[in-house]
Amino acid sequence: METEQTLEERYPDLSKDYGPGKFDTYLGAYLWELSLDGGCDEETGDASTVGWYGLFRGNFEHPQLFDVAGAILYTNNDGFVDARTFQDKASLEKAWMRVLKETETDEEE
């Protein structure tokens, strides 16, 4: 009987390129799957207009992300996914505040 793989087993090396396709890297694919299971701490935007953004504040189970303060996941209206990690909380929160400002401004127009 075959056992289901964990996300960490399916994506052992997050630094590798995933493409071509929806994801640029395995990091994006990994975070995308986490987001589908409600793994985002916050989210904003809409993929069909300004783009959808998900914020992850650390505590990842993947060994390559143990020392990461967090990440921001982005999906555009074409379905492409991009992800960026942050080494410290201050830079993560600063980037997230920029995202919130951009999505609020774009949604108002």
Image (spheres, rainbow, N blue to C red):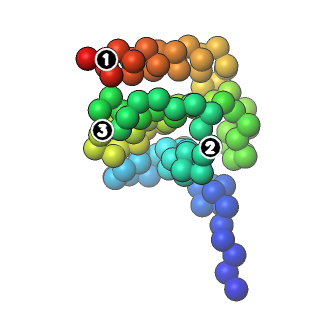
The residue that label 2 is drawn on is 39
Q: CA distance from mark 3 to mark 1?
A: 15 Å
Say whether residue 71 is left or right of residue 77.
Answer: right
The residue that label 1 is drawn on is 108
Q: CA distance from mark 2 to mark 1?
A: 27 Å
Expressed as whole percent of the image width and height from the top left, the position of residue 107 reads: 33, 22
Find out whether the residues at labels 2 and 3 contact each other: C-beta distance under 8 Å: no
Q: Identify the residue shown where x is 67% and y is 20%.
A: 88
Along the viewing direction, whichever of 36 and 7 lies nearer the viewer: 36
Q: Identify the residue shown where x is 41% and y is 48%.
A: 23
Numbered mark located on residue 48 in the image: 3
Sequence-wise, the earlier of marks 2 and 1 is: 2
**Residue at the bottom extreme of this rendering:** 1
Expressed as whole percent of the image width and height from the top left, the position of residue 85 reads: 57, 31
Expressed as whole percent of the image width and height from the top left, the position of residue 9 reads: 66, 60
SS at badge 1? helix
Q: Residues within 10 Å of mark 2 (few under 14, many from 20)?
A: some
Along the viewing direction, whichever of 103 and 14 lies nearer the viewer: 103
Q: Identify the residue shown where x is 66% and y is 55%.
A: 8
Q: CA distance from mark 2 to mark 3?
A: 21 Å
Q: Residues within 10 Å of mark 1 (few under 14, many from 20)?
A: few
Mark toward the viewer: 2 or 1: 1
Amino acid at circle 3: Ser
